[in-house]
Amino acid sequence: MIGASANVRYPRWLRRLFRNYAVIPALALLVVVFLMSVLAPWLAPHSPDQGEIAKRLLPPAWSAGGSFSHFLGTDALGRDILSRLIYGARVSMLVGVAGTVLAALMGVTAGLLAGYRGGWLDDLLMRVADVQLAFPFILLAIALLVVLGAGIWNLVLVLGLSAWVTFARVTRGQVLALRELEFVEALHALGARDSRILARTILPNVTSALIVVASFAFAEMVLAEAALSFLGLGVPPSTPSWGGMVSEGRDYIIFAWWVITFPGLAIALTVLSVNIVGDWIRDVLDTRLTADA
């Protein structure tokens, strides 16, 4: 029995999970952030919007003058920072997920059509992508938000429109390689429709690459939302967001460090965790690696 158990082959993703010591805490942190965003009304100890001026700029509980009723302290309006962090996770997760999904839908569709059809359609879509790539991501998002106005769903739309190019180019490259393979040619010879070939044969074969792209796009969306909210162009000031909290706390960084430190840490750790998990997903899905890797 001992010899048999010693020869057990664990799944590749599980072997890589335990070999990469940074992945487990990164996954745990992302689970915590997700639960915070879903269970915010039940987890937050106070209302994120209501404050008490008499309790403004209270330090964290472990500092002199702090209170355990406001564990991470309060901001300049006496609002509980922990509660605002929990509710701010909702904005980051919503914008990250919805923006990534929108960018993926647009980019994958464009990449499939460009790579499979080729010709003038490929030239047109790729030239549009090249023109968009000529503009810095954040400047393009700022320009669009100035036109559309601040708001969560406008922010999602702008980030999706700004990030579809990466999905399109990756998808197109994969499709160009796949469409010349023998099994695709065989489907053509059998009379299969182009839509069926794209949906049933080509798209499943590019999914692994798209999952990796999506993981890094999600981190970019979270960071972009924080940056735009910091500039006052993201979500409205009445909605708690990590970027907005950093913006509100910048005037108090010298004598009330906790107002800006905790939302800044939340942004940094979330983006870092997503990137670590994205690296792990890339390693697991990379078929060029050996089976024992």
Image (cartoon, rainbow, N blue to C red):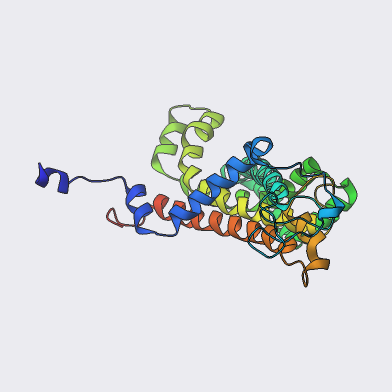
Q: Give how far across and how far down residue 155 sits, in percent.
A: 78, 46
Q: Quadrant of the N terminus?
A: top left
Residue 103 left/right relative to 8: right
Q: Is residue 291 above or below residue 35?
A: below
Res. 179 in view: no
Q: Give how far across and how far down residue 96 sits, in percent.
A: 66, 47
Q: Is residue 251 above or below residue 274?
A: below
Q: Give how far across and how far down residue 128 sits, in percent.
A: 73, 52
Res. 166 in view: yes
Q: Give how far across and how far down residue 43 sits, in percent.
A: 64, 40
Where on the picture, by quarter, is residue 101? top right
Residue at left offset 28%, top offset 53%: 291
Residue 18 left/right relative to 220: left
Of 188 and 81, the residue lying toward us: 81
Q: Quadrant of the C terminus?
A: bottom left
Of 7 and 146, the residue lying toward us: 7
Residue at left offset 40%, top offset 38%: 183
Number of marks in the rendered image? 0
Of 232 and 70, the residue lying toward us: 70
Where on the picture, by quarter, is residue 255? bottom right
Q: Is residue 61 above or below residue 157?
A: below
Residue 11 left/right relative to 87: left
Specify the farthest residue to the front: 65
